[in-house]
Image (spheres, helix red, strand yellow):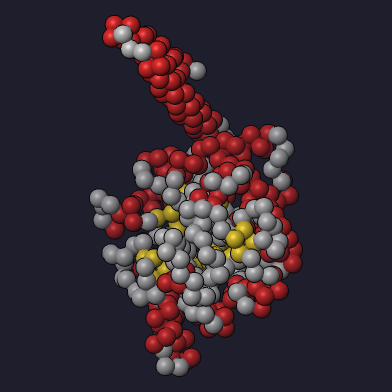
Amino acid sequence: MLWLLPIGLGSLWLLNGFRVWSRQTGEPSYHRWLHLLVVCLCTVGLTIWGTTEGQYHLDKRMVLQGDGATLLGQHFVVGYRNFDQVRTLVEKGGIGGIFITRRNLEGQTIEQLQQQIASLQAIRQDQQLPPLWIATDQEGGIVSRLSPPLTHLPPLADVVSQAPTAAARHEQVQSYGTTHGRELAALGINLNFAPVVDLNKGIVNERDRFSVIYRRAISADKVVVADVAQDYCMALFREGVYCTLKHFPGLGRVDGDTHLTSAHLNTPVAELEQDDWIPFQQVMRSSNVMTMLGHPILTAVDPNHPVSFSKAVVNGILRQQWQHEGLLITDDFSMGAVFNSHDGVTEATLKALNAGVDLILLSYDVDLYYPVMAALLRAAQDNRLSVEQLAASRDRLQHHHLQHHHLQHHHL
């Protein structure tokens, strides 16, 4: 804890300086007390900052110097700003995938990014580990993280509204998905966080800055959404890319923005089963899809936890009632609905894995990875991690990696 010494010495120096100054200037006593209060507050702030920063570096050292992260790392998909840092995590076997977005193209060409992705996969191959999940957000419309240089397509809702017949819509969606799939696969991306299958309930909230589902949803019609999502996912998969249905349990009725704060879905389960969940249930029967878990609180099932780490929803509904054995990935755990929850990110991650989630997404704030992984390693030592759930998740991940390997071999 030697890094706290400069903070303490600096605070004493400031305090002594204020005392000397107040005597020399003849400041009134209440001014001297005010100055003392300022110094104390600064000292407390610096100490808290120093303690947090020191703990971060301890966690980072724990993760990088130990070997426990190799087993748990397969459950993490992380974003990055610095390529060297993410390469270190790959070399340690500390992650199962990376998230590519606009910031990863800054200052370099698409070819350079392609080479970086290939170099990471080469490391995995040398380690005799499954390929990394290389993920992005390329929905079309306002969420097209890699356009340009990739083709910027309109939202799928435009394709649906402009198609004169169901047959024409089918062909156009297939073409749309093929364009996405070919361009992403050429770059080395094998997982797309699309399509959005939240139903368009027309909810517009001026405080909703990032979710804006009404601008991203395919349709208000559950049957149309299911058909379009199925066609899109099939086209993507034929090009070697997995699709991701998002955001279960559906954000179309949610008024708040989970990027910033908690939000509630107050609709009865019976109504969701007849409406919002139809596209999820229909397309999740395919083995070539992932499902992204959103962060709203499904109040009828679990009023205390967001869906993304709710055992009652993930294990109770998806794994047990629906008997779903496909991969489940969370929405970004950097988001306010998780980060500011009473559990916080570390406890939320533990609960998610214990509930039957396969992949934890940390796409925005990459610095969260080290404290989260360190917390998991400590939880494993304390027998707080479900051995049964982790084993089942490893089986699911292995199955999908084998499936993807056969698909890639077929393309070759």
Image position, residue 78 (x, y; %): 47, 49
Image position, residue 50 (x, y; %): 45, 25
Q: Residue at x 57, y 35 (%)?
A: 374
- 395 w.r.t. 200: above or below: above
- Depth check, front residue: 156 or 49: 49
Q: Residue at x 44, y 45 (%)?
A: 365
Q: Residue at x 48, y 91 (%)?
A: 166
Left or right of 290? Residue 271 is right
Count the marks: how many? 0
- 261 w.r.t. 221: above or below: above
Left or right of 56? Residue 358 is right
Res 179 visible: no
- 285 w.r.t. 38: above or below: below
Q: Residue at x 54, y 46 (%)?
A: 340
Locate the C terminus by quadrant: bottom left
Image position, residue 138 (x, y; %): 40, 66
- Depth check, front residue: 39 or 120: 39
- Depth check, front residue: 33 or 105: 33
Image position, residue 102 (x, y; %): 33, 56
Left or right of 46? Residue 321 is right
- Depth check, front residue: 129 or 142: 142
Res 56 visible: yes
